[in-house]
Amino acid sequence: MAKTGRQLADENYARWQMFYKKGLISRRTMLKAAMVWAGAGTVGSVLAACGGDDDDDSPGAVPTATTAGAAPTATTAQAAPTNTPAAPAMGGTLRVALAESDLPTMDPHMHNLRTGIITFYHMFDNLGVRNQETLVIEPWLAESWEVVEPTRWRMKLREGVKFHDGSDFTGATVKWNWERITNPEQKSPQMANQAAVAGVELIDDYTIDVITHNPYPIFTERLQNFQMISEKVAEKGDEFLAENPIGTGPYKFVEWKKGQEIVMTANTEYWNPDVTMAYTDVILRIIPGVPTQLAELLAETVDIIRVVPFDQMQAVTNSGVATPKVQPILRVQFVRLDAKGRGTPDNPFTDVRVRNAANHALDIDTYIETLQAGGDRTPAMVNPKHFGFDPTIEPHTYDPDLAKQLLAEAGYADGFTVKWMTGASLMPNATQVEQAMQRDLAAVGINTELNYLSDGNLFTTLHNEGKGDPMMSYSWGSYSVFDTDGIYWDMFHSDSIFSYYNNPEFDALIEEARGIMDSEKRKELYSQAQRIIRDEAPVLFMWGLHTVWGVSNKVDWSPAPDEIDRYFWAKPA
């Protein structure tokens, strides 16, 4: 006789109790599991019952090198090919813990969130996509492209592609999308991604010429994260687009329960026969708190979570219901300093000596060893995976005495106190890392007051509007562009809405690098730019992430190095 949902839940809860008795999970995690089992309405009610116990899940505990730095059992994710065939039979539902906070919009041009990129990769298509074996951008909605003049790219588009509402994908569609995203009045957070494009000319219904202001070496890189919207649907207005994602992708939008979940169903008429979805439905859930996401994974109420703390990897492995999968990715973690006084004009970090002092105060190598095993140090914030990374750039040494000397020279011999805005993070052990940094900064006289914002949309809005604190925890996935342009232009160019730094010499270097095709010359320019950033230290330099996903043993799926989770690759194990 088939077991009821209640019976299955009781069995899962009994398994959790066994894990707790064996010391495989903490008390707080056990309470999270109890919440899932009992169907508790809020995280707060369960945590209140905890009495604030300081166990190994709590913000106050830093794992030792033994627990976090060791190499727990895990599966290293393998890069999947672009067209990974899924199971031939379709059915069932895949449930994913997408994020801790909801998306701000269903308009793929009006956000800069990684979770939005992932969501829209399923309902929309791009002109090009990355082959996960070669990491080269290959044709998708575009069948081909070529440079016909230094500033002119001719593109042949795929015929017969339909949007989910039945409207046609044509050259007019592509022209409209480029004109929309580069229109200053649209105020798209992604405008800088396509700012090099001067215009689009229609040759015929399925041939276009894309004109760039200058030769544009990363033209194809930018094709893989520029989702196509139907110009016919757009006639209904931006408010309609914000609520109704209608693309050409392998999944169709069904429902958005704001703050709870996004429901999609398979597009059985998808234009690409090589993409065969194994799951009829995909549900992307909004689940506040990584511990709650972990509890739901092990209670088998979700199939994939996007962050597993390093010190919980062994518990996931030992559970027998899920596997931690480690994947080095392009994303760089850092703490932004308000170097130009954009949010707080008189903050101490407008002084370059203070910024360098703060970097010398941090024992980055020890953090990596004990809390971020496998992280790739980024001395000038460029990931080794970015084209143009200069391995000769020396990182800041851990030197508290030098930090104190620099602070004294800047007039802060007695130290100072500053606010530090932080929030939900894709970095495993984020809280422990920040607390370790806090202690090291305080040891040289830089005292920080953490301002935690659980609402990721509020964090992003305040940051982008120049209303952030003098210190802000941040990470950047470069829109999955494997080129230094993908991080330097958005994070540091003085015209960028994300930038809290201003240096005309730096701007000129990356502008020149964006406008020439000579790869060796581009490397030279990026090397010079990296030396400026390293010396001027507009951030606290950290590392490129090695992130841990948690995947149900019932699901055959692995993450990719470009950090775009493609759930249409997933199939039953």
Image: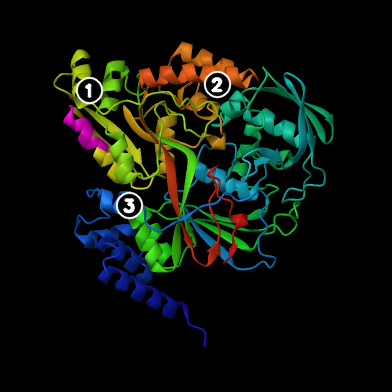
Q: Residue at x 31, y 36 (%)?
A: 365
Mark 1 sits on what residue? 403
The quadrant of the rendering that contains the C terminus is: bottom right
User: Does residue 232 appear left or right of residue 298 in this picture?
Assistant: right
Relative to the observer, which residue lies in front, 175 or 127?
127
Mark number displayed over residue 388: none
Q: Secondary structure at mark 1?
A: helix
Mark number displayed over residue 523: 2
Q: Secondary structure at mark 2?
A: helix
Please name which of the two marks, 3 or 1, marks the residue nearer to the observer: 3
Question: Taken as a whole, is the magenta stretch helix, strand or loop?
Answer: helix
Q: Crowding at label 1, few (<14), some or many (≥20) Cα neighbours within 10 Å?
A: many
The alpha-carbon separation of the residues under discs 2 and 3 comes to: 36 Å
Q: Is residue 134 above or below residue 267?
A: above
User: Does residue 550 appear left or right of residue 411 in this picture?
Assistant: right
* Total numbered labels placed on residues in the image: 3
Q: Is residue 58 magenta?
A: no
Q: Contact (CB < 8 A) between labels 3 and 1?
A: no
Q: Residue at x 25, y 63 (%)?
A: 27
**Splitting the image into 4 quarters, where does residue 298 fall?**
bottom left
Magenta stretch, residue numbers = 437-445
The alpha-carbon separation of the residues under discs 3 and 1 comes to: 31 Å
Q: Residue at x 64, y 49 (%)?
A: 81
Please name which of the two marks, 2 or 1, marks the residue nearer to the observer: 2
Residue 7 percent coordinates (x, y): 42, 80
User: Does residue 14 appear left or right of residue 138 in this picture?
Assistant: left
Relative to the observer, which residue lies in front, 463 or 484?
484
Q: Crowding at label 3, few (<14), some or many (≥20) Cα neighbours within 10 Å?
A: some
Residue 457 percent coordinates (x, y): 44, 41
Mark 3 sits on what residue? 70
Instruction: Check disc 2 and give the amino acid type.
Output: Lys
